């Protein structure tokens, strides 16, 4: 029960934000929630399976462009249908990509995912008639649970119904991922991360489990990608660019990939810190680059690692006293 | 015969690591493979466990051709192994390591939404931990265990697969002399309890080899020098000269 206190309080705070915070701050929570869904999936692959992808922007792009296509080209505006279609397309594309990538590990895996990501980026950038090229495509306001809220002012829509819709998606995604990482499947992934040779000797098919983890992470990235569309009302190729893949890896490292909630904390801090730094200096990437170096050198466990070590120190002091 | 290898040959370029090696292990046997460094023991183990394919020859396990089949298929067929250099999952606890083996044995690794607290998985893992004297350390992360316990955990996880045959690659290497016999006693007792039909081990410690083996296969320069009972091996001058050494043979 004690370990539910932190997540419970965080959820309560998220639910209260639109009621107590100004709309601008509330709007920043929308990308946070979309990235939180994406990072839950990415960390299944990275933190739990030991494979670091530098190409997950590919699946974010698939989710975002699926939503844009469905709303602006096919007139399908149901967000539930968009999320399902995004997940399905993400899985469809991930199946062959994962089959090729999981045959490799470490830098080779990373570079291969990066290469596939860049193939998709070039596709959405160059096939102008289909994708709108560098201008992107409009992501029309979707229906939420069948309700057409077109008449509602945009900000009111985003900080109201859309906000709580995103909270619901995040809660469902978190509960599902929590079950997955604590399941027999999740345990097998952790054996592969720790020692693939030993895992295989225990009869655990390493490539098959890596493929499954990749598929799940791609589905999460596509769903999160679809949630990124409505707040801006437009999707463009930068969503699929490799720097976007780098950003989500940064968020994971910032929060701490060894902890289930680490990447979520990383996404939250990244979004608000980026906003703060950008409002002060235009060189936010310079600041974030230095921050990344500091994290990797001094706090490889990320913010969650720091919190955990503080907690351990306090417990040691308390037991000593 | 539970395991049979016929004319196994392995070439690495021009170098012949194994030269027409044949062996057979029957049910109820504890067989040891001995040989000096470079005799081809590791190559033989890798071929028998399907990690690598022979240049020529075949391996049959329970009458099925398993030549180059790979660890996963062999584990599922009922052949488990432990490693010369201890292989553990550093960030997993003792209990989680054993649970992973049980999950694999029960074929439940694909279950995304079921719980690890499942009674069958938990009880089988705890039972194996108790069997190997690791019961009180089951919540300790594997990397924090002393070397002897790491070795035991490596072997215990193989036993948790409830295999019909187990292949132990130097089960007492890297362990203090005092701990060696204790480990072997635990291992033999666990084999009886689990119902393992045959054990094949590679071992350098001749005291361990002669104390526990029903049969000994001596390898030298990639060939089988002798395949006989411990008493016959002790009297085999060729084996003494090439493998055991005169001083060690006299000391026995």
Image (tube, coloured by chain):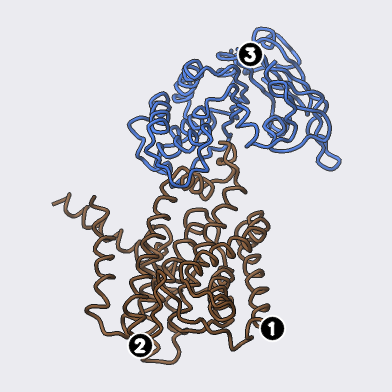
Chain colours: A brown, B blue
Task: Give the chain letter at badge 2.
Answer: A
Reading the image, the residue beneath label 2 is A153
Task: Give the chain letter at badge 1.
Answer: A
Residue for point 67% across, 9% down: B229
Horizontal side of residue A34 vs B241, given as left or right:
left
Instruction: Look at discs 1 and 3 and give the one toward the viewer.
Output: 1
Sooner in the amino-acid sequence: mark 1 or mark 2: 1
Q: Quadrant of residue B17?
A: top right
Query: Does B192 appear above or below A252?
Result: above
Task: Give the chain letter at badge 3.
Answer: B
Residue for point 32% across, 86% down: A24
Reading the image, the residue beneath label 1 is A126
Horizontal side of residue B80 vs B182, given as left or right:
right
Q: Where is residue B247 in the image (x, y as percent from the top left)?
A: 64, 18
Query: Does A159 appear above or below A260?
Result: below
Marks 1/3: CA distance? 66 Å
């Amino acid at each position: 029960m004690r370990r539910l206190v932190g997540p419970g309080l965080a959820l309560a705070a998220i639910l209260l934000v639109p009621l107590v915070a100004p709309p601008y701050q509330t709007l920043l929570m929308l990308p946070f929630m979309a990235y939180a869904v994406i990072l839950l999936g990415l960390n299944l692959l990275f933190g739990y399976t030991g494979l670091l992808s530098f190409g997950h922007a590919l699946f974010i792009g698939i989710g975002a462009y699926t939503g844009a296509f469905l709303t602006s080209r096919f007139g399908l505006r149901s967000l539930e249908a968009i999320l399902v279609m995004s997940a399905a397309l993400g899985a469809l594309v991930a199946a062959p990509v994962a089959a090729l990538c999981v045959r490799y590990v470490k830098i080779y895996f990373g570079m291969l995912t990066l290469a596939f990501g860049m193939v998709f980026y070039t596709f959405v950038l160059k096939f102008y008639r289909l994708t709108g090229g560098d201008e992107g495509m409009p992501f029309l306001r979707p229906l939420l649970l069948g309700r057409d809220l077109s008449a509602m002012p945009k900000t009111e829509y985003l900080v109201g119904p859309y906000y709580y819709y995103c909270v619901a998606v995040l809660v469902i995604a978190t509960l599902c991922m929590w079950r997955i990482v604590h399941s027999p499947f999740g345990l097998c992934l952790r054996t592969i991360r720790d020692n693939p040779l030993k895992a295989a000797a225990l009869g655990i098919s390493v490539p098959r489990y890596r493929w499954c983890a990749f598929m799940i992470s791609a589905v999460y990235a596509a769903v999160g990608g679809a949630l990124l569309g409505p707040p801006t009302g437009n999707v463009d190729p930068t969503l699929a660019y490799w720097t976007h893949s780098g950003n989500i890896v940064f968020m994971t490292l910032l929060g701490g990939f060894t902890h289930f909630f680490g990447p979520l904390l990383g996404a939250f801090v990244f979004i608000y810190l980026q906003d703060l730094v950008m409002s002060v200096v235009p060189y936010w990437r310079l600041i974030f680059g230095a921050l990344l170096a500091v994290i990797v050198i001094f706090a490889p466990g990320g913010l969650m690692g720091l919190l955990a070590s503080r907690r351990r120190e306090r417990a040691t002091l308390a037991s000593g006293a | 015969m539970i395991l049979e290898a016929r004319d196994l040959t392995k070439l690495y370029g021009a170098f012949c690591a194994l030269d027409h090696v044949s062996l057979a292990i029957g049910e109820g046997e504890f067989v040891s493979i001995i040989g000096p460094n470079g005799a081809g023991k590791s190559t033989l183990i890798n071929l028998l466990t399907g990690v690598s394919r022979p240049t020529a020859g075949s391996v049959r396990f329970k009458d099925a051709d398993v030549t180059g089949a790979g660890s996963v298929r062999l584990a599922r067929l009922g052949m488990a192994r432990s490693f010369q250099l201890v292989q553990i999952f550093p960030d997993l606890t003792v209990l989680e390591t054993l649970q992973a083996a049980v999950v694999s044995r029960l074929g439940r690794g694909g279950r995304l939404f079921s719980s690890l607290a499942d009674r069958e998985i938990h009880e089988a893992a705890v039972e194996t931990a108790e069997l190997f004297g690791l019961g009180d350390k089951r919540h300790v992360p594997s990397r924090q265990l002393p070397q002897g316990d790491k070795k035991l955990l490596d072997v215990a996880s193989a036993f948790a697969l409830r295999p019909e045959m187990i292949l132990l690659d130097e089960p007492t290497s890297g362990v203090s002399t005092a701990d060696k016999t204790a480990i072997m006693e635990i291992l033999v007792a666990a084999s009886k309890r689990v119902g393992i039909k045959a054990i094949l081990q590679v071992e350098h410690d001749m005291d361990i080899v002669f104390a526990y083996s029903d049969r000994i296969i001596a390898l030298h320069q990639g060939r089988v020098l002798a395949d006989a009972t411990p008493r016959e091996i002790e009297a085999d001058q060729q084996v003494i000269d090439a493998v055991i050494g005169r001083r060690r043979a006299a000391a026995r």
